[in-house]
Amino acid sequence: MNALIFGANGQDGYYLNQLCKARGINPIPVSRSGQLFIGDVSCYDQVEYFITKYHPAYVFHVAANSTTRHDALFENHATISTGTLNILEAVKIHCPGAKVFITGSGLQFENTGKPITEKDQFEGNNPYSVARIQSVYAARYYRSLGIRVYVGYLFHHESPLRKPNHVSQKIALAAKRIAAGSDEILDLGDITVKKEWTFAGDVAKGIVKLIQQEDVFEAVIGSGVAYSIENWLEQCFSIIDKDWHNHVKLLDGFTPEYKCLFSNPQTINSLGWYPIVELPELAAMMMNNSQADEML
């Protein structure tokens, strides 16, 4: 039994790859870079090649540039929107019995500061959310054609595999350098912003839980618990036994995209999925650069 993982070079792809191995499923990790199967999900011919060659039981589309910047407009459209269409059309033609997972995001919903569910209204207020919304409507269309396509709306989730530009990893890496003797000052924006800090390995298990049943086809996958950036600072700097106030400069005039973004995971909870790793354990994991594969 094969599972194609498009976007396998990111943290979600890594943990899905490990989960498949642990469950006796043969993962085929595909990425545009890295020591994996080289393939571009935005190219139909390449997607079709992998679908016809491996005839997968599962296809996971977790490829994306996770930024809302306008200059990523065409990349997000190609990877997320076109990539979704490429996968679904190739599956429809060559492997209609496969189950397909399409990644959604909490950022594609109207955010009123209340917990977000999969039934809430979409809001395309940046190129990233527009691409995500397009991919969901494509998924719903192909579902009407008989393809078993699932959408998991993911909220902020973290791991030692996070790229340094994400605030979680930016803080963790700075704290480690400071512990080693650096006298640097970390520039941050609004540290009162609240979001979820779920472990990416737990989220991957939620994705697998969703795609391995037949009753629910769209669900938010998140902890449902919001912590501030300040909470994360406290966790990371407590590990090195230092006061973060002495190492952080808050930027004047910084305007965040939102003040609070978190989920209501009631639907995925009803399927038996709950995250296990809590904030202190996640901070320790990232500070120690431990992927925690044994927890999968």
Image (spheres, rainbow, N blue to C red):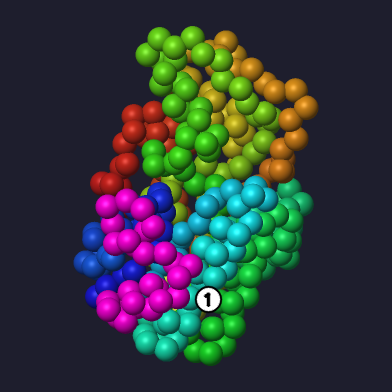
| Quarter of the N terminus within the rendering | bottom left
Which residue shows up at 54% across the image and 50% down it? 66
Q: What is the x, y in percent for residue 43?
A: 45, 70
Identify the image quadrant of residue 133.
bottom right
Near mark 1 (Cα within 10 A), the count class, few <14, some 14-19 or many ≥20, is many
- The answer to whether one can see residue 112 in this image is yes
- Which residue bears the numbered disc 1? 85
**Percent x, y of residue 139:** 56, 76
Amino acid at pointer 1 = Leu
Residue at the image point whose x is 49% and y is 9% from the top: 183
> Dividing the picture into quarters, in which one does residue 6 lie?
bottom left
- The region drawn magenta spans 30-56
Report the side of 92 relative to 20 (left or right).
right
Task: Give the mark count.
Answer: 1
Whether residue 217 is visible here, answered yes or no, is no
> Residue 40: x, y in percent?
42, 64
Per the image, label 1 sits on a secondary structure element best described as helix
Between 247 and 112, the one lying in front of the other is: 247
Q: Nearer the viewer, residue 242 or 30?
A: 30
Q: Where is residue 42 in the image (x, y as percent from the top left)?
A: 48, 67
Going 37% across and 59% down the picture, which residue do you hit? 31
261, above or below 124, in the image: above
Residue 43 included in the magenta stretch of the image: yes
63 w.r.t. 163: above or below: below
Direction from residue 131 to residue 86 in the image, left or right: left
> Looking at the image, which residue is at 36% across and 53% down?
33
Residue furthest out toward the left:
24
